[in-house]
């Protein structure tokens, strides 16, 4: 008896530990949505202000509406057609059963990246414009298999004699289906519906390839915002979603146990969904009347709502913006040729690639007087676009070193610190091939745009020797690790550090004496932009000195515009991440397209990450 009790206690403790492991992160997320600090690294007291901030965030609500609309449509389509397919597959003597099973399971075993690339190429061949419809079609292709498998398993376990008895007693096939088959399969159908809804709602990878104008979903929005770290607004929206999904799980459980009728379960699920959708639709319902539309594809860190609203008021238009998280994602969309963006903001080397591939339109320079009058001449005529035929500088920054002054007891001014064994396990590097190799090449005294195989081999060997010291490779929220003290030193994008340094004054940002990457992101017009004149008007508006100063204050990035420094907030002027010492930029370089040699960079980078 004592042994049985000990075994019972051990089983209970193990079960409790498993549940704690699963749900502790969710509980922490919910608690930190009420944290007064913008940093997730420390608790400064209780507040509900982030929910108020969230309510005013138009882009979050628009992306949430997109996710709900897509997930609801995909769920309905998959449940209807998946259940019909499962009924066919459940027949005992179905010809080609093995082949059909393979077709059903195939979307679940093929890597998502393969499905994403194949889907976007397929849409491009059909000349189908990327939109919410293309997201829905893509989601159906891999979600319908869940319904067929889950419902099919339920139907396979059913006692077919009950259906046969109903037919023998005079019921036709439709009556048998609605009175016998459907009620018995209902728990599986609802479970499959919840699984499809969750899978569609959460999908990021495939969605990022097939999303078009005004079709940014919540996962895309959140992931793109991680460039600024995990903010309380993201915690707040996640908490709301969790609170909304818990009732759906309870409904599914009660239906599965037989303690709730099918009609009641369906009604309850619809009621919960309406409660989720109604405030979102009410918040984002468009105003009446047609207004011109400007569609922008941009980094999340470059969005200033005050600039957007100011332009809308003055030019009587509506600005729609979607977000990307890498230059390569932008390149993929423009290469597909089935998106209607009017304005994009690629980085320097990507401007060169896009222009060479004929994906950018030439600018009408006569429509951009503010740009040519107010941009610092140092940022014009750069190597990636010598005559500024395709691009206008938008923002600039550096990739340097950030470190905690309370944990690193010395002044840092060299890349050499990343190779110091004293800091082993506390060093972060960017998860970026060119930036990491650029750092190593600079330390070795070479150009960060080197195409010399021997120099690249030396850089690879140097990075391989360094790897045991590295805590990780992180390009998304490295600043949060610094703020929490989990990392002491990090290779860092300057713009990511601006607001973190304001909230955590023990973090310092420096440009190494060997030099680093200096980058310029530029405003460009895609070749097939439908509203080119409005896009050029936006560029010209942005380069008014007072608007450029507003951008610096709101976004924490510098701009090449010659604005008045007295219009910049004092704490920003004192921040070396935004306003570095000009002398420190002497050895910095712009990143260039290295042509075919990029394959050697990629191969060496794979070797480093695989060790």
Image (cartoon, rainbow, N blue to C red):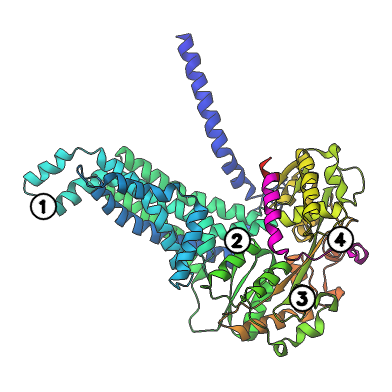
Which residue has dot 1 on it? 172
**Which residue is outermost to the bottom?**
366
> For the magenta stretch, what is the residue range?
581-607
Please provide percent x and percent y for residue 312: 62, 80
For the residue labelled by badge 3, is the local secondary structure a helix, a strand or a loop?
helix
**Of the residues tagged 3 and 2, which is closer to the observer?**
3
Q: CA distance from mark 1 to mark 3?
A: 72 Å
Residue beneath disc 3: 548
Identify which residue is drawn at 81% across, 51% down: 440
* Structural distance between the alpha carbons of marks 1 and 2: 54 Å
Residue under label 4, please give it.
Answer: 576
Q: Are marks 3 and 4 in contact (CB under 8 Å)?
A: no
First of labels 3, 2 by sequence position: 2
Count of marks placed on residues: 4
Visible residue check, residue 226:
yes
- Answer with mark 1 or mark 4, whichever residue precedes in sequence: 1
């Amino acid at each position: 008896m004592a042994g049985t009790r000990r075994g019972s206690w051990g089983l209970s403790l193990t079960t409790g530990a498993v549940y704690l492991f699963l749900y502790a992160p969710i509980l922490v997320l919910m608690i930190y949505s009420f944290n007064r600090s913008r940093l997730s690294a420390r608790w400064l007291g209780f507040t509900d202000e982030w929910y108020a901030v969230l309510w005013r965030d138009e882009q979050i609500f628009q992306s949430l509406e997109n996710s709900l609309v897509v997930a609801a449509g995909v769920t309905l389509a998959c449940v209807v057609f998946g259940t019909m397919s499962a009924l066919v597959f459940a027949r005992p003597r179905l010809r080609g059963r093995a082949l059909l099973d393979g077709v059903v399971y195939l979307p679940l075993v093929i890597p998502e990246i393969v499905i994403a690339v194949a889907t976007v190429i397929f849409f491009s061949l059909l000349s189908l414009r990327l939109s919410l419809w293309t997201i829905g079609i893509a989601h159906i292709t891999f979600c319908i298999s869940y319904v067929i498998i889950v419902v099919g398993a339920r139907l396979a376990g059913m006692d077919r004699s009950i259906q046969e008895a109903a037919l023998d007693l005079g019921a036709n096939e439709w009556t048998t289906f609605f009175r016998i088959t459907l009620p018995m399969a209902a728990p599986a159908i609802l479970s499959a519906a919840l699984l499809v809804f969750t899978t569609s709602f959460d999908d990021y990878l495939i969605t990022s390839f097939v999303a078009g104008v005004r079709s940014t979903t919540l996962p895309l929005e959140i992931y793109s915002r991680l460039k600024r770290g995990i903010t309380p607004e993201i915690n707040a929206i996640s908490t709301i979603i969790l609170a909304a999904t818990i009732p759906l799980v309870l409904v599914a459980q009660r239906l599965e146990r037989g303690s709730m009728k099918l009609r009641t379960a369906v009604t309850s699920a619809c009621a919960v969904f309406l409660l989720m959708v109604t405030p979102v639709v009410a918040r984002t319902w468009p105003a009446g009347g047609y207004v011109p539309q400007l569609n922008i594809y941009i980094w999340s860190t470059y969005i200033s709502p005050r600039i957007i609203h100011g332009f809308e008021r003055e030019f009587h238009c509506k600005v729609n913006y979607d977000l990307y998280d890498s230059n390569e994602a932008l390149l993929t969309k423009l290469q597909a040729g089935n998106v209607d963006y009017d304005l994009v903001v690629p980085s320097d080397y990507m401007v060169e690639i896009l222009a060479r591939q004929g994906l950018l339109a030439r600018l009408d320079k006569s429509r951009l007087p503010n740009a040519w009058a107010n941009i610092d001449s140092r940022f014009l005529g750069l190597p990636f676009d010598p005559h500024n035929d395709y691009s206008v500088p938008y923002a600039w920054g550096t990739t340097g070193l950030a470190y905690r002054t309370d944990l690193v007891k010395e002044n840092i001014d060299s890349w050499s610190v990343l190779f110091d064994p004293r800091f082993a396990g506390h060093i972060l590097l960017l998860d970026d091939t060119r930036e990491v190799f650029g750092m190593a090449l600079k330390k070795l005294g070479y150009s960060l745009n080197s195409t010399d195989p021997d120099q690249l081999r030396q850089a690879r060997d140097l990075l391989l020797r360094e790897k045991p010291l590295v805590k990780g490779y992180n390009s998304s929220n490295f600043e949060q690790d610094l703020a929490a003290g989990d990392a002491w030193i990090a290779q860092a994008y300057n713009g990511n550090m601006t607001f973190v340094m304001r909230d955590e004054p023990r973090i310092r940002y420096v440009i190494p004496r060997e030099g680093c990457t200096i980058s310029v992101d530029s405003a460009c017009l895609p070749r097939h932009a439908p509203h080119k004149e409005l896009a050029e008007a936006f560029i010209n508006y942005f380069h008014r000195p007072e608007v450029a100063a507003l951008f610096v204050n709101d976004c924490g990035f510098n701009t090449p515009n010659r604005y008045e420094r007295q219009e910049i907030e004092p704490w920003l002027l004192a921040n070396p991440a935004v306003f570095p010492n000009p002398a420190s930029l002497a050895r910095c370089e712009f990143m260039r397209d290295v042509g075919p040699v990029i394959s050697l960079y990629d191969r060496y980078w794979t070797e480093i990450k695989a060790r």
